[in-house]
Amino acid sequence: MFKRILLSSLVLAAGIGFAALPDLNQADRESMANLIVKGKVVKVTKTLQDVGHGDQDWVFTAALEVSTVQKGDQELGLLEITYSKPAKRPKNWVGPQGQKLLPRVNDEGVFYLQPMNSTTAWRLLEPNGWDKHASALQETYIDHDDLDLDLDLDMGWRYDVGDELHHHAAEDHEF
C-alpha cells in the first residue's frame, strides 16, 4: 500500500512540475485589461533580463500601430508594449510562463493591456494577452513544402521561403 501511495505521489508531482498558468477566459481578459486595442506590430526588440535567483527572462518591447481602441483612453498611432518569456528557470519550475504566443513584426490582432508602472508603459496580460487576427494567420501561413527549417544550437531559428532568408537568433537584436 505504501508503495502505491508513493508511486501515485511521484506521478502527480511530475505532472505538476511542468504546469503553466492556464489561459485567461475572455471575460477575465476584458475585465482585467485597462486598455484593449486592435493594431499591427511594426517593430520588436528583445533583451535578456535577470529576474533574481539566477532566473532570466526574454523581455520583448514592441511598437504597436493602434488602429482601434476598444477599451480605455488611448490615441491612435504608435504604442509601446512589453511582454516576456522565461529564458532560464530551475528544473520542474511551476508558475508564469510569459506569453504563449509571442507577437512578431507584422502580426495584427487585439491586445489586452495593463499599465506597468505608469499609464504610459503597457504590458500584455499573461499568458494569453492577445488574439492574432484570422487574416494575419492566413497571411503568415507557409506551405511546409516551401519551408527549409534549421534550428540553431543558440535556440534561434531561421527559415527560407523562396529567395528570402528569415533569421531570429537568441541574442539581443531587432527583428
Image (cartoon, rainbow, N blue to C red):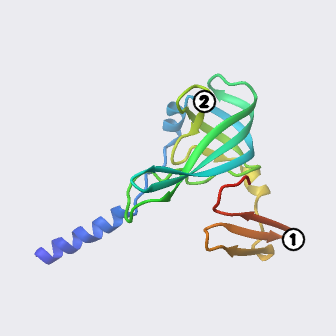
Q: Amino acid at mark 2?
A: Leu
Disc 1, SS: loop
* Residue 4, horizontal then vertical, whole percent: 17, 75
Q: Amino acid at mark 1?
A: Gly
Vertical relation: 153 (above or below) 54: below
Q: Quadrant of the rendered structure where residue 163 is?
A: bottom right
- Location of mark 2 (residue): 35
Residue 162: assigned label: 1
Dot 2: within a 10 Å radius of its alpha carbon, few (fewer than 14), some, or many (20 or more) residues? Answer: many
Q: CA distance from mark 1 to mark 2?
A: 39 Å
**Viewer-side residue, 132 vs 122:** 122
Vertical relation: 29 (above or below) 105: above
Left or right, 163 with reference to 64? right
Q: Quadrant of the rendered structure where residue 115 is?
A: top right
Dot 1: within a 10 Å radius of its alpha carbon, few (fewer than 14), some, or many (20 or more) residues? Answer: few
Residue 117: assigned label: none
